[in-house]
Amino acid sequence: MPLVDTLASLALLQGASRPALQRIASVLYEQPVVAGTVVIRQGDAPDDLYLVRAGVFDAVIGDSVINTIGVDGWFGEIGLLQQVPRTANVVARVDGVVWRVPGPAFLAALGDAADDRAAVTAVAGEPAAAVAAGPRAG
């Protein structure tokens, strides 16, 4: 499946235009992640969006796992869209792979069309319990 089609199939990006998806596809890069790696830390400044391609990642606040993110899930969007520090630690439970999308490129691609940002924000703003069937954490 072409990269843009894969991006379009992700719930987070389903409302994004094809040109926005093409811009995201042009800048993302694959990053292997070793089990136990803290990919993002609660309180850090937001940098990138992470799309899970392999593995399982836990969103953790304190000692509690608040969400588990698997293949086709994502994390890191809350800080980017709301311009707030990271809301949780995200830790690789097993070895995995993420597609890392630079935050500025993600926001710029969505900023080209208000409808794109509104669609993505609507999905990203759903409570974790509401998206349990569609993996997500941020």
Image (cartoon, rainbow, N blue to C red):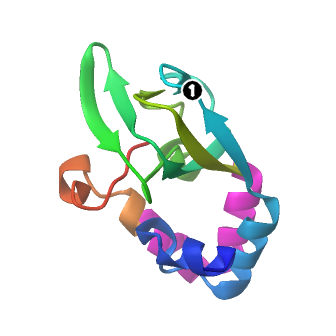
Left or right of 115: which side holds 128? left
Instruction: Residue 107 in the image: state x and y as whole percent.
Output: 68, 60
Left or right of 94: which side holds 8? right
Image quadrant containing the C terminus = top left
Q: Nearer the viewer, residue 34 or 86?
A: 34
Question: Farthest residue toward the left?
Answer: 129
Instruction: Residue 111 in the image: state x and y as whole percent.
Output: 68, 70
- Classified by dominant secondary structure, the portion drawn in magenta counts as helix
Q: How many marks?
A: 1
Label 1 neighbour load within 10 Å: few <14, some 14-19, many 20+: some
Instruction: Residue 64 in the image: state x and y as whole percent.
Output: 24, 20
Question: Farthest residue toward the top?
Answer: 63
Where residue 48 sits, quadrant-wise, is: top right
Identity of the residue drawn at 57% across and 26% down: 34
Q: Is residue 116 magenta?
A: yes
Q: Is residue 107 depicted above or below 17 in this figure?
A: above
Left or right of 19: which side holds 122? left
Task: Tell me if I can see residue 4 in this picture.
Answer: yes
Q: Nearer the viewer, residue 24 or 46?
A: 24
Left or right of 24: which side holds 37? left
Question: Farthest residue toward the right?
Answer: 26
- SS class, disc 1: loop
Task: Tell me if I can see residue 46 in this picture.
Answer: no
Q: Is residue 112 depicted above or below 101 in this figure?
A: below
Image quadrant containing the N terminus = bottom right
Q: Is residue 47 depicted above or below 89 in this figure?
A: below
Identity of the residue drawn at 74% across and 77% down: 22
Disc 1 residue type (three-letter): Val
Residue position for label 1: 34
Q: Is residue 2 magenta?
A: no
Instruction: Residue 66 in the image: state x and y as whole percent.
Output: 25, 32
**Magenta residue span:** 103-121
